[in-house]
């Protein structure tokens, strides 16, 4: 007979509730009950409405802006710690603030390191996340980090398209390692875009390194924010003779004029995951759910099993 204290409990943050419900369904459990009290000034307080003493619990929530999303996860971690949960795993499909992974100019914070420390201080004993903006962020944690790859979802989808003359592209030099990993698995060519920024989210110049003439190009990136880079890269590649341009981006932040840029761009399709809920639907945006991937890894963690089979790259 299974000891009930060995069974894991799953909880979802409000900003990721749809994904949390899908993960729980794939996992084979129901989400636990959390109530939120909200004060008139906007301050909120989560409350677990069931005992979690001695249990392993998973708290599912992405930390995309606004900062309330991060704060909600932190408060739930702290509440779980103070309720004597045995293991507290923060399942963070999208790890926000990850672009601040280094000091790229004087007198700026390393925000990703700060967030890592805050998560651990709040009570997280393990982190499960996907496609971090920079791999070294794993080293910012003292607790175990399971870093999943969106390629486990995207590569089967790309194979199902049966694209001839496939070429993988990186929209910038920093993403070339990711592009080469995709290209190796798909046995395709690689091209790289070299861009210069005027300031954050503003591109002043872009050049293409490689030949895309007659190719079906797939741009690969970890996130799409304003979509300026992707749409500019698509324009450059079509000008250089590409047959078609698609884009794969794990995390669909899609802020500012992103939707308008995508709709008016030469991108044939933007393929994303549901790590961040879309603000609205678009005929050009294809969403692949990551619920099954996270549920499978959570099951392995709960059963102390290897998760290496979940890594394609």
Image: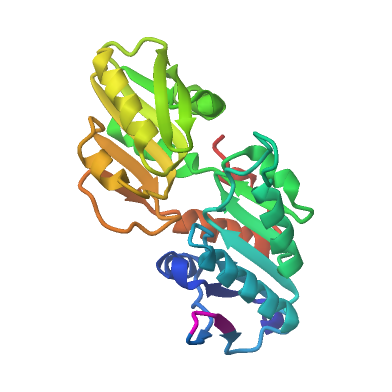
Q: What x and y, as percent, mark residue 171?
A: 43, 27
Q: What x and y, as percent, mark residue 61?
A: 53, 65
Q: Nearer the viewer, residue 160 or 275?
A: 275
Residue found at x 24% / y 44%:
260
Q: Nearer the viewer, residue 150 or 242?
A: 242
Q: Nearer the viewer, residue 185 or 254?
A: 254
Q: Quadrant of the C terminus?
A: top right
Whether residue 15 is visible = yes
Whether residue 8 is visible = no
Q: What x and y, as percent, mark residue 117?
A: 74, 58
Q: What x and y, as percent, mark residue 49?
A: 57, 89
Q: How is the image coloured?
A: rainbow
Residue found at x 26% / y 39%:
261
Residue furthest toward the front? 107
The answer to whether 301 appears left or right of 241 in the picture is right
> Magenta part of the protein: which range?
41-46
Tag count in the figure? 0
Residue 9 falls in which quadrant of the image? bottom right
Relative to 247, residue 96 above or below: below
Q: Nearer the viewer, residue 196 or 5?
A: 196
Relative to 273, residue 124 above or below: below
Q: Quadrant of the N terminus?
A: bottom right
The answer to whether 267 appears left or right of 298 in the picture is left
The answer to whether 312 appears left or right of 119 in the picture is left
**Magenta stretch holds residue 291:** no
Residue found at x 25% / y 13%:
241
The answer to whether 33 appears left or right of 201 in the picture is right
Relative to 30, residue 152 above or below: above
């Amino acid at each position: 007979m299974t000891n009930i204290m060995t069974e894991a409990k799953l909880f979802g943050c409000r900003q990721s509730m749809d994904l949390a419900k899908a993960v729980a369904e794939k996992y084979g459990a129901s989400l636990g009950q959390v109530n939120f009290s909200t004060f008139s000034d906007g301050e909120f307080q989560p409350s677990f409405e069931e005992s979690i003493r001695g249990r392993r619990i998973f708290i599912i929530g992405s930390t995309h802006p606004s900062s309330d999303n991060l704060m909600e996860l932190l408060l739930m971690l702290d509440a779980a710690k103070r309720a004597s949960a045995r293991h507290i795993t923060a399942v963070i499909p999208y790890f926000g603030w990850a672009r601040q992974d280094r000091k790229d100019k004087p007198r700026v914070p390393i925000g990703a390191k700060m967030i890592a420390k805050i998560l651990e201080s709040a009570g997280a004993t393990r982190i499960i996340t996907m496609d971090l903006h920079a791999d070294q962020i794993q080293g910012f944690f003292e607790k175990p980090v399971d870093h999943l790859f969106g390629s486990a979802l995207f590569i089967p989808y790309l194979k199902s398209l049966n694209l001839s003359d496939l070429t993988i592209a990186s929209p910038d030099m920093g993403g070339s390692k990711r592009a080469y990993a995709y290209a190796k698995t798909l046995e395709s060519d690689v091209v790289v875009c070299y861009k210069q920024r005027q300031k954050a989210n503003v591109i002043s110049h872009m050049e293409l390194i490689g030949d895309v003439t007659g190719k079906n190009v797939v741009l690969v990136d970890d996130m799409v924010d304003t979509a300026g880079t992707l749409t500019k890269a698509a324009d450059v590649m079509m000008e250089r003779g590409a047959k078609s341009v698609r884009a794969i981006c794990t995390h669909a932040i899609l802020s500012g004029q992103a939707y308008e840029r995508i709709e008016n761009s030469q991108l044939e399709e933007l393929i994303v995951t549901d790590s961040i809920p879309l603000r609205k639907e678009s005929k050009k945006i294809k969403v692949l759910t990551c619920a099954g991937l996270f549920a499978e890894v959570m099951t392995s963690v709960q059963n102390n099993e290897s998760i290496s089979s979940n890594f394609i790259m």
